[in-house]
Image: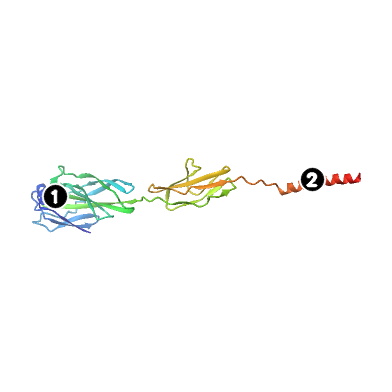
Amino acid sequence: MEITLYYTVSEVAAMRSIFPAVAFISVLLLSAVAGALFVGLAEANGIFVSPDMFTEPPTITILSTSVNGNNVTINFKANVGKSATAVKPLIDTVICDVDWNQNRTYVYRHYNWDENVFDTEQRTEVYCNFSETAVPDGNHTVTIYASEMGYYEGRGTFHITGFSSVNFTVDTVPPNVSVLSVENIAYDLSDTALNFTVSEKASKISYALDCQRNVTINGNTTLTGLTYGSHNVTVYAWDIAGNVAASETITFTITEPFPVVPVAAASVASVAVVGVGLLVYFKKRKR
């Protein structure tokens, strides 16, 4: 990875005001080495130097990442790296790169190029906030670069840049919920299986029977103790991102079972009736 930075005449003058002995060169070449970006350059009079082995790159600490729909906010801080040799190190620039477009966002600059002014403090720690709207759905990465500037006594000025990446997912599409086992028909049992599918991993599932309060479940279940008559049921599912979806509301009926007379009992009763009738008949014939 190679990044080229160009400084204007006014920026060169501003840099010289920090380090009067520095004859600032306009083009700096950065190359990525072992997790840090080290500045090399076409030197002018040997004033700008590469960071030595005793100087570590700035550190970036992610404090929070918030995803709300298609809006993302990242809070973090940048600190100068440890060094046994650097004099007056400070955070010079903090930049955020995103993977969904080519925009580069400056979230902090010690020297404000637009207003041609310096931050009045030479900050060794900077708290930053990066916010972006209309982030597309999907898995994303934001890479944060923090550039540090310092001085080596008797040698010259150096730049060194550290970086850190933040990964997150934007998901605004709710899952799809389909009820499989309950249909718009009549049932003659008071217990009915409630089977369904959810199109993605769910963080919560519930159902509402007859528009009553939702009952949380872990998966397929059984509706028990249903009374005779008409009923309706709806299944709800939340995905990991918090999007909620509802199934189609299914209306069904529990019917009262048709009365059944045991065959054996009916046969005994029939025989008894026929026997009594025959007995009466023969008694009348004898007379």
Judging depth in this view, the residue of 225 and 52 nearest the camera is: 225
Q: Nearer the viewer, residue 54 or 182?
A: 182
What is the x, y in percent for residue 156?
11, 52
> Where is residue 129 drawn, in percent x and y?
25, 45
Q: Is residue 176 left or right of residue 106?
A: right
For disc 1, the marked residue is 151
Front-most of residues 133 and 20: 133
Amino acid on which the number 2 mark rests in the picture: Val
96 or 283, which is in the foreground? Answer: 283
Where, quadrant-wise, is the N terminus in this rendering?
bottom left
Would residue 85 be visible to someone looking at this image?
no
Q: Residue furthest right?
A: 287
- Find the distance from the CA under tag 1 to the CA under tag 2: 120 Å
For marks 1 and 2, the one nearer the N-term is: 1
Residue 273's disc is 2
Q: Is residue 63 left or right of residue 85?
A: right
Helix, strand or loop under label 1:
strand
Q: Which mark is residue 28?
A: none
Who's the residue at 17% across and 52% down the image?
A: 159
Contact (Cβ within 8 Å) of mark 1 with mark 2: no
Left or right: where 234 falls relative to 117: right
Characterize the local packing of mark 2: few (<14), some (14-19) or many (20 or more) Cα atoms within 10 angstroms: few
The crowd level at tag 1 (other Cα within 10 Å; few <14, some 14-19, many 20+) is: many
> Can you give x and y, in whole percent of width and height, for residue 31 in the image?
20, 58
Which quadrant holds the C terminus?
top right
SS under mark 2: helix
Q: Residue at x 79, y 45 (%)?
A: 273
Identify the residue at image location x=13%, y=45%: 117
Residue 229 lies, in percent from the top left, at 57, 43
Instruction: Tell me the amino acid under the disc marked 1.
Output: Tyr
